[in-house]
Amino acid sequence: MTPMQISTTASDHPTDEARLAEIHANPGFGTYFTDHMLTVEWTPEKGWHDARIEPYGPLQIDPAAAVLHYAQEIFEGMKAYRHPDGSVWSFRPEANARRMARSSERLALPVMPEEEFVEYCDALVRADERWVPTSGEDGEKSLYLRPFMFASEVFLGVRPAQHVTFMVIASPVGSYFKGGVKPVTIWLTEQYSRAGRGGMGAAKTGGNYAASLVAQQEASAQGCDQVVFLDSVEGKYVEELGGMNLYFVYGDGRIVTPATGTILEGITRSSIIELAGKMGYTVEERKFSIDEWKEGVASGQITEIFACGTAAVVTPVGELRWEGGSLPSAPVGEVAMELRKQLVDIQFGRADDAFGWMHKIC
Ligand SMILES: *Cc1c(COP(=O)(O)O)cnc(C)c1O
């Protein structure tokens, strides 16, 4: 492969050290953005071209840009971690690249080659390296990377766009949990679905999030933190939360995670499948019904439930509520906390990377 040409225009007003220290002390989640952003354009004639790093700032977008009308858009989410020796690493970025390629195929967007995707993410991190925090007191501060791709063609006809823009932006983030990991309460929506058969459920696209928001509102109105979706055909099988995959731990050493064809397969989810296997658990990827959930908790056979994703890593699931009923909380489990610790320790370079998951950026 020929080396990629990325032109760089450095910001003439980079965030000063004092302000950056303030942001690093209290980053929140997705609130502050680094000094630069990376952009690459695509057309059928030229393929991917005009890769550039520029000062972070608003885009000029034509009101007729196709993405604003037909939502032809996909995204990814990953983190860059600073290790104790000062080096900066990402976690399985080639898995994000492959998933973005699958999302591209589903949304009729162009595929970006895996090594280009990884190189573009790395290039932005190198340009804004001082924005990668040290892991901090809670040991979980990192730089969140948001690669995304959208239909930038100016055209109101309905067909796959002939001009597409890929970008990477980055935001320093703290631990998802302020004051320790807490179980989330879950609302079971029986009215809304997130994805349908043959739909976009397995693609990481904004449209799936748009479809989930009203159900999330319903959950909030019921005093719950998150919503869980069932399959849209039978309303029987557990899919996932709006942005996290689910795991059910049985007292007999089995761990079950739903597989339905319409969930978004998380990289955290697949890493836990491997970690749990290595720890001696039997991992089952299969359809898992809401009745199994209710009965398993009632009988005590399910000892722990947790959700997982890049942002929160592993989150214990507490009470489940639905219209006219509820299930008590499973205790905050040891298995979830052990998996969480193993994963975070690998990501931050505090444990041996036995699976070869880490990718060195700088
Ligand atoms: C991104 C995402 C997840 C989690 O995936 P990770 O790769 O583990 O961060 C789960 N569900 C949905 C709908 C998502 O968009």
Image (cartoon, rainbow, N blue to C red):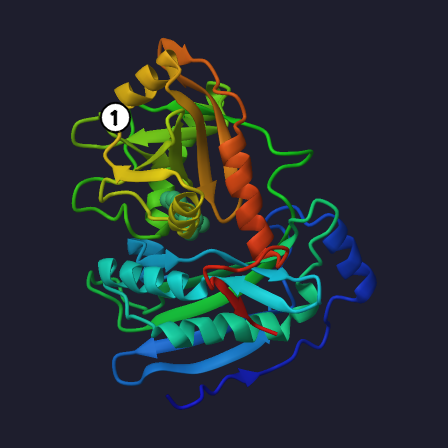
Quadrant in the picture for the C terminus? bottom right
Seen as rendered, the residue at the extreme right is 18
Q: Residues within 10 Å of mark 1 (few under 14, many from 20)?
A: some
Ligand 1 near label 1 (Cβ, under 8 Å)? no
On screen, 322 above or below 82?
above
* Rendering quarter of residue 262: top left
Seen as rendered, the residue at the extreme bottom is 2
Question: Residue 308, percent across and down?
Answer: 45, 41
Question: Residue 202, percent across and down?
Answer: 28, 49
The amino acid type of the residue labelled 1 equals Ser
Helix, strand or loop for disc 1: loop
**Horizontal relation, residue 152 to residue 176: left or right:** left
Disc 1 target residue: 289
**Horizontal relation, residue 346 to residue 32: left or right:** left
Question: Residue at the spot x=60%, y=51% of the render?
Answer: 345
**Horizontal relation, residue 32 to residue 58: left or right:** right
Seen as rendered, the residue at the extreme front is 280
Report if residue 65 is visible in the image. no
Question: Residue at the spot x=73%, y=47% of the render?
Answer: 26
Q: 279 or 133: nearer the eye? A: 279
Question: Residue at the spot x=45%, y=43% of the render?
Answer: 279
Seen as rendered, the residue at the extreme top is 324
On screen, 69 above or below 46?
above
Report if residue 171 is visible in the image. yes
Question: Residue 138, percent across and down?
Answer: 70, 44
Question: Residue at the spot x=48%, y=74% of the render?
Answer: 120
Question: Residue 340, percent across and down?
Answer: 54, 42
Q: 173 or 256: nearer the eye? A: 256
Q: 292 or 56: nearer the eye? A: 292
Q: 218 or 270: nearer the eye? A: 270
On screen, 263 above or below 250?
below
